[in-house]
Image (cartoon, rainbow, N blue to C red):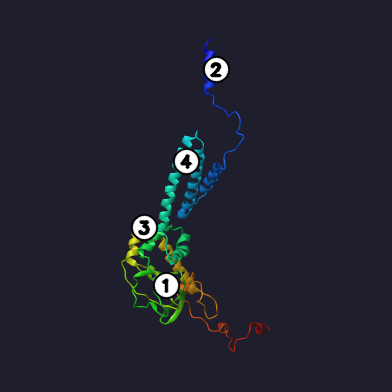
Amino acid sequence: MDLLPENNLTDEVLEYPVCSEWKEHPEGSVFHLAHIMLVLGFMGGSGFYGLLYMFCFLTLGFFCYSIWAWSDPCTTDSFSWTFALFALCLGQLIHVAYRLRSVTFEKEFQDLYECLFKKLGVSLTHFGKIVESCEGDVHTIEKDHFFAMEGKTPIDKLSVLVSGRIRVTVNGEFLHFIYPFQFLDSPEWDSLRPSEEGFFQVTLRADIRCRYVAWRRKKLYLLFAQHRYIAKIFALLVRNDIAEKLFSLNDKAFDIRGFRYDLRLPSFCNGPGPEIANTNESRPVLGQNETKPAERDS
């Protein structure tokens, strides 16, 4: 009989306390501002700028939370946790800002990154290694000066035009132009193995004042050996540039009748056959002893 009251007392002790009534007044504005900052911070993206955005709002959010916790003397644990998280986010914010400062580039390299590398998902860290391999130099070619001469200039670098326009000729015959953010020597680069040497088979002359970025072969191959990801990026860029140059040549490949050749057709690769100057000559000429089908029927 004495066990029943003890069991009831145990159940009352283990029962989870329920809030008897809601607070009549909401928390202060600092409390709500802290949560707004945290929500904005957790919406941050990836990359340096995404991390900078995220840690900036998280730092402000935990700082506001610490102020709110300090105002309540009964929330010592809350203040300790929020202030620790505030200090951690502030440290991360400073670290990301320092890293972002170390990967900032000049305008020409920034434009090069935006036009070629960013759309392939290359991070600023990897692009920084690419810039380091060319020593951060941008070279200049004055108008009517030559970048390369056929049969004389060795193929010892890979270059990208940053500004200006380059005229490409072979035996004095115009082939095509090279425009900004296109490679100057992608066909020559792709035609040689790392251990081979060769010379340009075309002449490259500046139509106007040009600026370009160049990587030496040895340094670039050393970078490829250390970072296979960068090697794949350059292989993709170079082959895409070669394809664009081929199709720019395809726009000028017409036969005598005005039809455009298609580079994908094997007849073009093997060399087109002799063209007939006049389409009327392709029709058979009737001899004097031959009659037209209509006359024969009559």
Measured as percent of width and height from the top left, residue 150 is found at 37, 78
Residue 211, labelled with which disc? 1
Label 4: element kind: helix
Say which residue appears at 40% left-offset and 79% top-offset. 145
Instruction: Identify the residue under disc 4.
Output: 82
Task: Kindly report which numbered mark, 2 or 3, lies closer to the viewer in this rendering.
Answer: 2
Q: Earlier in the sequence, mark 4 or mark 2?
A: 2
Kind of residue at disc 3:
His
Nearest to N terminus: mark 1 or mark 2: 2
How would you rate the neighbour count of disc 3 (Cα within 10 Å): few for under 14, some for 14-19, many for 20 or more?
few
Residue carrying label 2: 8
Looking at the rendered structure, the secondary structure element under dot 3 is: loop
Vertical position of residue 81 compared to residue 226: above or below: above
Amino acid residing under circle 1: Arg
**Mark 1 or mark 3, which has the lower sequence index?**
1
How far across and how far down the image is residue 78, in percent?
48, 37
